[in-house]
C-alpha cells in the first residue's frame, strides 16, 4: 500500500516534470518521456519484489523429537523421559522443569516438593495468588503440598519456530524469577 502511494506520487512528479520540459523543448521531450516511461516500467517489478514480505514457515503442531532438536540447537539441556515420549526433562540451573507436547499445545511445568516446608498452606496459597496477580502468562498453584509453575503455548493456527524459541526463553525466565522470589521465600 505504501509502495503504491509512493509510486503514484513519483508518477505525478514525473508528469509535471515532463509537461514542463515539453513546453520548453517540444519534440525532444517526446523521446525523453518514452525513455523515462520504459525505465519506470522496468524498475517497478523490481521495487515490488523487494517490498514483498518474506514467508516464514509456520507449524501448528510439533513432535517431541522436533522440540528436542530445536531446544538443543538453542543450547538447552533436554532429555526425553523413557516412560512418556511427550515429556522432556529440562534442567535449568540444576532444577528440573518439564516441557510437555500435548497435541497443539506446548506446556512447561515445574514442581517443587513441599513436603519439607515449614510454611502453612495459607502462606503457600497467598504466594501463588500474588504470583498470578503479577504474572499474566504463567500460573502458580499448589497441588497437595507441592508448589507448581505452568506456562502454555497454543499452536492452533500456527506459530513460527522463533515463537517456540521465544516461549522457551519465557519459560526459563519465569522459572528463574519464580524460584528466586516465590519458592525461596516459603522454604
Image (cartoon, rainbow, N blue to C red):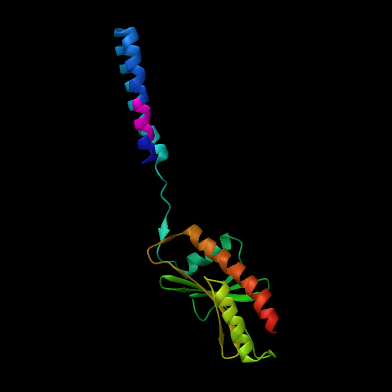
**What's the residue at 57%, 69% (across, down)?**
171
- Residue drawn at x 60%, y 68% is 172
User: Is the N terminus in the top left, top right, bottom left or bottom right quadrant?
Assistant: top left
Magenta stretch, overall SS: helix
| Residue at the spot 51% in from the left edge and 81% down from the top edge | 83
Q: Is residue 11 above or below residue 124?
A: above
Task: Determine which quarter of the picture holds residue 182.
Answer: bottom right
Tell me the quarter of the image containing the C terminus.
Answer: bottom right
**Above or below for 111 versus 121:** above
Residue 40 figure quarter: top left
Q: Position of residue 28 (x, y in %)?
A: 32, 8
> Observer-nearest residue: 147 or 73?
147
| Left or right of residue 115: residue 41 | left
Check if residue 9 falls in the magenta segment: yes
Q: Which of the pair 15/28 is nearer the observer?
A: 15
Residue 138 in view in this figure: yes
Marks counted in the figure total 0
Q: Position of residue 124 (x, y in %)?
A: 62, 86
Say which of 54 and 10 sits in front. 10
User: As displayed, is residue 104 above or below residue 70?
Assistant: below
Residue 25 magenta-highlighted:
no
Q: Residue at x 59, y 75 (%)?
A: 97
Q: Position of residue 68 (x, y in %)?
A: 53, 67
Camera sees residue 39: no
The range drawn in magenta is 6-12
Amino acid at each position: 500500500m505504501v509502495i503504491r502511494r509512493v509510486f503514484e506520487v513519483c508518477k505525478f512528479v514525473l508528469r509535471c516534470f515532463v509537461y514542463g520540459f515539453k513546453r520548453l523543448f517540444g519534440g525532444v521531450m517526446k523521446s525523453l518521456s518514452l525513455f523515462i516511461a520504459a525505465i519506470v516500467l522496468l524498475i517497478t517489478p523490481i521495487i515490488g519484489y523487494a517490498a514483498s514480505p518474506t514467508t516464514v514457515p509456520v507449524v501448528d503442531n510439533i513432535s517431541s523429537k522436533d522440540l528436542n532438536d530445536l531446544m538443543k540447537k538453542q543450547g538447552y539441556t533436554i532429555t526425553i523421559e523413557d516412560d512418556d515420549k511427550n515429556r522432556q526433562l529440562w534442567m535449568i540451573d540444576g532444577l528440573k522443569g518439564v516441557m510437555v507436547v500435548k497435541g497443539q499445545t506446548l506446556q512447561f511445568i515445574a514442581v517443587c516438593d513441599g513436603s519439607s516446608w515449614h510454611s502453612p498452606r495459607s502462606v503457600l496459597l497467598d504466594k501463588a495468588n500474588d504470583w498470578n496477580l503479577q504474572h499474566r502468562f504463567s500460573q502458580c498453584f499448589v497441588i497437595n503440598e507441592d508448589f507448581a509453575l505452568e506456562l502454555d503455548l497454543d499452536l492452533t493456527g500456527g506459530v513460527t519456530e522463533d515463537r517456540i524459541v521465544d516461549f522457551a526463553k519465557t519459560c526459563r525466565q519465569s522459572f528463574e524469577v519464580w524460584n528466586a522470589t516465590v519458592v525461596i521465600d516459603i522454604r
